[in-house]
């Protein structure tokens, strides 16, 4: 079935609000066997009329977001009813719902709010448990000359849209689709390879089969290999994917590398401390974004200044003077110092030159040393070069640190 999404809202086109609807709806529709074929964003106001008329002739299911509120620029329900030739009728249950919600919040009921209770004849009301504007479902209308798709009118705010979709829209869509399909999407998260390399060693081979949809999503120093096919086919080719990608494969369900590392440390009942200089706390941030990180992450140090490295981590001042703050010996001392100070099982030390100034011929901008200390084991260190902007540099440095730790905890 051909599915389209029509997002309304001038704030989306002005860049004041990030449009998160498409990602959420795409992920939510796929398990139902539905794929979004087209997405359109339009401003508030009468432009929705043309957008609806154009979409009616193209799609089987049209999901419209926004324009259901009480203000004058919220005209999605009115234009939809007009185009379908349906009269708007006040729905007593919706009026009662709005009244109760406003009373709980001690907000007076204003006349314009009653617009939200106007429902096109024959429409199914989709209750809004997080706002006052209900959603609407309108089944296809067939005439001698034209037809309309299944129409879903959903509110714009994500905190209202998502629960409404899950509770009300999804069950209707499941009935429309006639059950769950034998189709899956698996995302293999790869680190340390570019998309062209991944395509060369495994992607082309899979594409030539003809029964798998292969796609890629590249980011600095990582790429997602996306495979869509029946479960049986995916099970058949997964061993080929594992063999081709080897130690570069982080996960087969799209998990972030920090998720994989945190979960593995929890399995091993091991702990990690980090000491960061040039990454300014980003590594700690990525680790603590993962639920359950408190079980494995007792402490992190951001030691930007040399004095902080000496004071907080016990790095010898004479070592910094002799080798420089950006050096392998200092990175090793930072990793060991963090591990010992926190009483952890592993310690990571990162020191480098993010730029754009401060480099030299032997240590140019982009140079970074990453060390991994292991209690009862050897301390590892690697030198990398990431001559790019500061934000990307920090992302790449922390990515390399996490990959270094991943390989250690999985014995790769």
Image: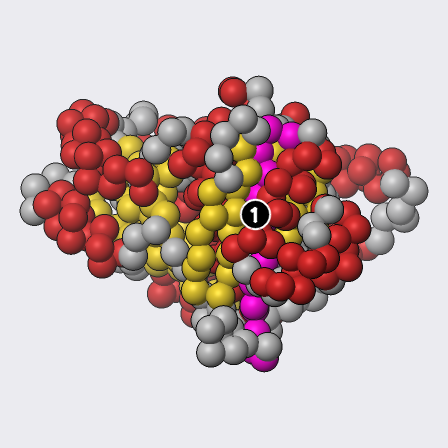
Question: Between 315 and 342, which is closer to the camera in this rendering?
Answer: 315
Question: Between 61 and 252, which is closer to the camera in this rendering?
Answer: 252
Residue displayed at 19% across by 34% down: 243
Residue displayed at 61% across by 34% down: 272
| Total number of numbered discs in the rendering | 1
Q: Position of residue 319 (x, y in %)?
A: 65, 57
Residue displayed at 22% across by 58% down: 196
Q: Secondary structure at mark 1?
A: helix
Whether residue 195 sits left or right of residue 166 in the image: it is: left
Q: Quadrant of residue 95?
A: top right
The residue labelled by disc 1 is 332
Q: Position of residue 63 (x, y in %)?
A: 45, 50
Task: Check residue 348 for magenta coloring.
Answer: yes
Tell me which segment is drawn in magenta: 344-357
Q: Height in image: 337 above or below 396?
A: above
Residue displayed at 58% across by 24% down: 270
Q: Position of residue 32 (x, y in %)?
A: 35, 33
Q: Quadrant of residue 101?
A: top right
Whether residue 208 sits left or right of residue 181 in the image: it is: left
Few, some or many C-alpha atoms within 10 Å of disc 1 (few <14, some 14-19, many ≥20)?
many
Residue 410 is at least partly visible in this image = yes
Q: Height in image: 410 above or below 101?
A: above
Q: Height in image: 153 above or below 278?
A: above
Residue 290 is at least partly visible in this image = no
Q: Height in image: 2 above or below 220?
A: above
Q: Quadrant of residue 325?
A: bottom right
Question: Between 158 and 394, which is closer to the camera in this rendering?
Answer: 394
Task: Check residue 202 for magenta coloring.
Answer: no
Q: Position of residue 363 (x, y in %)?
A: 49, 71
Q: Quadrant of the C terminus?
A: top left
Whether residue 208 sits left or right of residue 289 in the image: it is: left
């Amino acid at each position: 079935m051909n599915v389209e999404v029509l997002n309304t809202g001038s704030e989306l086109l002005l860049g004041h609000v990030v449009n998160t609807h498409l990602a959420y709806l795409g992920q939510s529709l796929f398990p139902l066997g539905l794929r979004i074929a087209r997405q359109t964003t339009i401003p508030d106001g009468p432009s929705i009329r043309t957008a609806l008329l154009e979409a009616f002739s193209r799609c089987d299911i049209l999901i419209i977001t926004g324009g259901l509120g009480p203000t004058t620029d919220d005209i999605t329900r009115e234009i939809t009813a007009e185009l379908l030739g349906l009269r708007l009728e006040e729905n007593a249950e919706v009026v009662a719902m709005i009244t109760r919600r406003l009373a709980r919040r001690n907000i007076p009921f204003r006349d314009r709010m009653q617009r939200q209770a106007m429902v096109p004849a024959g429409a199914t009301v989709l209750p809004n448990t997080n706002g006052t504007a209900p959603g609407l479902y309108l089944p296809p209308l067939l005439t001698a000359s034209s037809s309309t798709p299944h129409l879903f009118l959903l509110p714009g705010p994500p905190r209202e849209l998502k629960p409404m979709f899950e509770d009300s829209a999804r069950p209707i869509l499941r009935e429309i689709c006639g059950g769950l399909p034998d189709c899956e999407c698996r995302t293999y998260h790869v680190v340390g390879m570019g998309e062209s390399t991944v395509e060369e060693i495994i992607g082309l081979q899979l594409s030539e089969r003809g029964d798998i949809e292969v796609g890629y999503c590249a980011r600095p120093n990582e790429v997602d290999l996306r495979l869509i096919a029946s479960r049986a086919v995916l099970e058949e080719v997964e061993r080929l994917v594992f063999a081709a990608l080897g130690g570069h494969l982080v996960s087969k369900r799209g998990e972030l590398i920090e998720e994989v590392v945190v979960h593995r440390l929890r399995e091993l009942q091991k702990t990690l401390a980090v000491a960061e200089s040039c990454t300014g706390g980003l590594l700690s941030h990525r680790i603590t974004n993962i639920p359950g990180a408190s079980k494995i992450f007792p402490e992190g140090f951001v030691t930007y200044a040399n004095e902080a490295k000496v004071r907080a981590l016990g790095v010898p001042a004479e070592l910094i003077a002799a080798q420089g703050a950006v050096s392998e010996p200092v990175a090793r001392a930072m990793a060991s110092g963090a591990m010992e100070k926190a009483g952890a099982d592993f310690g990571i030390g990162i020191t480098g030159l993010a730029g754009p100034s401060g480099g030299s011929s032997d240590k140019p901008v982009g140079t970074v040393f990453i060390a991994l200390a292991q209690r009862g084991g050897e301390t590892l260190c690697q030198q990398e070069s990431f001559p790019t902007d500061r934000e990307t540099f920090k992302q790449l440095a922390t990515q390399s640190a996490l990959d270094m730790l991943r390989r250690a905890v999985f014995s790769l």
